[in-house]
Amino acid sequence: MNRPPIINSKLPDVGTTIFTVMSELAAVEGALNLSQGFPDFDGPSALLERVQYYLTHGHNQYAPMMGVSTLRAAIAEKVLALYGCTLDPLEEVTVTSGATEALFCAIAAVVHPGDEVIVFDPAYDSYEPVVRLQGGVTRHVPMHPPDYRIDWDQVADLRNERTRLIITNTPHNPTGTVWEATDIAALRDIVVNRDIYLLADEVYEHIIFDGRQHESLCSDPELFARSFVVSSLGKTYHTTGWKIGYCCAPRNLTTEFRRIHQYVTFTSNTPVQLGLADFLHDHPEHHQELGGFYQAKRDLFCEFLKDSPFDVVPSAGSFFQLLGYEGFSNEKDTDLAVRLTKKAKIASIPVSPFYEIDPGHKVLRFCFAKDDETLYQGAEILCSL
Ligand code: PMP
Ligand code: GLN
């Protein structure tokens, strides 16, 4: 008797990502979707025009494997201007299909079976499955409300000779917290003279509020020498659906990164890369003004919520706002998120799925990358609960 192979899953306990679960539920329930993080407005018209130009002028074949040269040059220029880090666009900048692909390639480049990777919970959900696919193990350092700071003593306790990688994320998704200079100093102490690489998820690098400064690992030459620094043009240019990101890393790490990238996607969408390159070059004011743009939305959303039953600690960065609901419900966050989507017609993201061990915090994440009218509608629902 012939039978099909029995599937031996590499990730048997991994379900569908919470972002898809909540966005699909919002669609089915006709709920206002403040769950998955994406803007409900378009990217700048000058950017759309540049992409349209390349799309209709014969630029529709494969781009170079590491990304088009104009985009890599524009990224290197921006990183130098912002963080004082000189990058060779030919050997230290790689364009990827979203930050997600860059995270995958960086983890796959350095994690071997048995290696340990330190992550900070709540941790963005793309990290752990990729570590496990390499035969690695994640070690989790939990962070707690209201400030969600890293306990560096705990990191020092977890670190050992198997520790190969630490994954950092500032501004942080899902909590909206931001690293301070003291975090960089603590990280330096943790890795000094050890075979530990760093993967910095900096996709919200420009979305930072109240005069804070983004602590990029590109700014610290010693740390950068062991780092993959990842960003996402989808976040910065309101075009998450284009899935263009990039990875900056020193030459030796970029070589390993590209060994994998060339067989994961080989390259990314050509006309979009070319259009983004022109826009980055011609409109540096866009990323310079992005913090102010989103800060105004954060302020509006928080102001609208001042008579709501939620606890609001204004987000320090990213386009997410955590709302504490201890004052009005004892439900588990996953249950409340589903109930609010079905009954109140507003969708959010529960935070417990981003923890190894659910600490039972009573918070939900709301995305404020929305038109002011959408934010008003959302707040109206939340105030009526
Ligand atoms: N890291 C974090 C922290 C994110 O929030 C996201 C996406 N929202 C990504 C990585 C992935 O970015 P991209 O859409 O460019 O793949
Ligand atoms: N990063 C986005 C968020 O936090 C979602 C991206 C995705 O759905 N993978 O909501």
Image (cartoon, grey):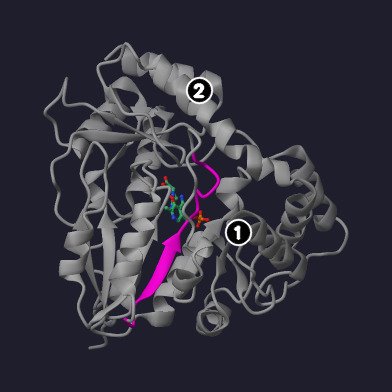
Mark 2: amino acid: Thr
Q: Which residues are magenta?
A: 194-208
Magenta residue check for 250: no
| Residue that appears at 41% across and 78% down | 108
Q: Nearer the viewer, residue 176 or 384?
A: 176
The N terminus sits in image quarter: bottom left
x%, y% of residue 36? 42, 42
The C terminus sits in image quarter: top left
| Disc 1 secondary structure class | loop
Cα separation, mark 2 vs mark 1, equals 26 Å
Residue 129 is at least partly visible in this image: no
**Total marks in image:** 2
| Disc 2 secondary structure class | helix
| Residue that appears at 24% across and 78% down | 8
| Residue that appears at 84% across and 52% down | 53
Magenta residue check for 204: yes
Q: Which residue is tagged 2?
A: 374
Q: Nearer the viewer, residue 121 or 129?
A: 121
Q: Which residue is tagged 1?
A: 244
x%, y% of residue 209? 48, 36
The image quadrant of residue 178 is: top left
x%, y% of residue 120? 27, 57
Mark 1: amino acid: Ile
Q: Nearer the viewer, residue 160 or 102?
A: 160
First in sequence: mark 2 vs mark 1 = 1
Left or right position of 148 against 64 = left
x%, y% of residue 175? 33, 42
Marks 2 and 1: CB-CB under 8 Å? Answer: no
Q: Cβ(mark 1) to ligand 1 < 8 Å?
A: yes
Label the magenta part by its dominant secondary structure: loop
The image quadrant of residue 138 is: bottom left
